[in-house]
Image: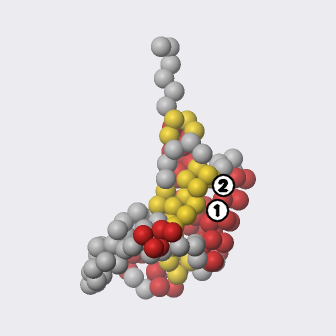
Amino acid sequence: AKAIHSFLGWEQEFFILKADLYRKRPDLVNCGRTLIGKLPTRNQQAELNYFAPVPEKVEKVLNNVQAAMLKLGVPMAVLHNEVACAQHEMSPIYCHSTFSCDNNVLFMEVMEREAEKLGLHALCHEKPFAGIN
């Protein structure tokens, strides 16, 4: 073999929160995850959220992100809910690993910008809430 070609297809999980509620939590603002507060009651996660329709305002954000990423040359293949409430996922079509890593960072920036336009905040930490998922 004269060359090795590495491909990568990432799946970015994130939470979409109302921006005003996010700003009231200094731990979320400064660390991107909860550090204080009571743990949720048991069984807060269910597959019902996974199969539920994407909330309307969140769907608008996801569609805006998908359109913005396509303009930047990164077609997104998947967008859906995840198991935890307010948790979602987007994934692009896989590509060369070096491009894919850059695309992931670009995606997180675009996601945060598009969410803010609609009064929301995107947490790009897949497990920011203790005891959930």
How far apart, in angstroms, are the residues tagged by discs 2 and 1? Answer: 6 Å
Q: Evaluate whether residue 36 shows in this view.
A: no
- Density class for disc 1 (Cα within 10 Å; few <14, some 14-19, many ≥20) is many
Q: Is residue 39 above or below residue 66?
A: below
Reading the image, the residue beneath label 2 is 69
**Residue 30 found in image quarter:** bottom left
Nearest to the observer: residue 53 or residue 38: 53
Give the SS element for disc 2: helix
- Density class for disc 2 (Cα within 10 Å; few <14, some 14-19, many ≥20) is some
Q: Position of residue 73 (x, y in %)?
A: 69, 47
Proximity of marks 2 and 1: CB atoms separated by less than 8 Å: yes
Q: Is residue 123 left or right of residue 77?
A: left
Nearest to the observer: residue 19 or residue 43: 43
Nearest to the observer: residue 66 or residue 45: 45
Q: Amino acid at mark 2?
A: Met
Give the SS element for disc 1: helix
Report the residue at 71% width, 59% height from top: 67
Q: Is residue 118 above or below residue 9?
A: below
Q: Is residue 57 above or below residue 14?
A: below
Report the residue at 63% width, 71% height from top: 59
Report the residue at 42% width, 70% height from top: 47
Q: Evaluate whether residue 74 shows in this view.
A: yes
Report the residue at 65% width, 48% height from top: 74
Which image quarter is the C terminus in? bottom left
**Residue 43 found in image quarter:** bottom left
Q: Position of residue 35 (x, y in %)?
A: 29, 75
Reading the image, the residue beneath label 1 is 65
Q: Which mark is residue 80?
A: none
Q: How is the image coloured?
A: secondary structure
Nearest to the observer: residue 57 or residue 99: 57
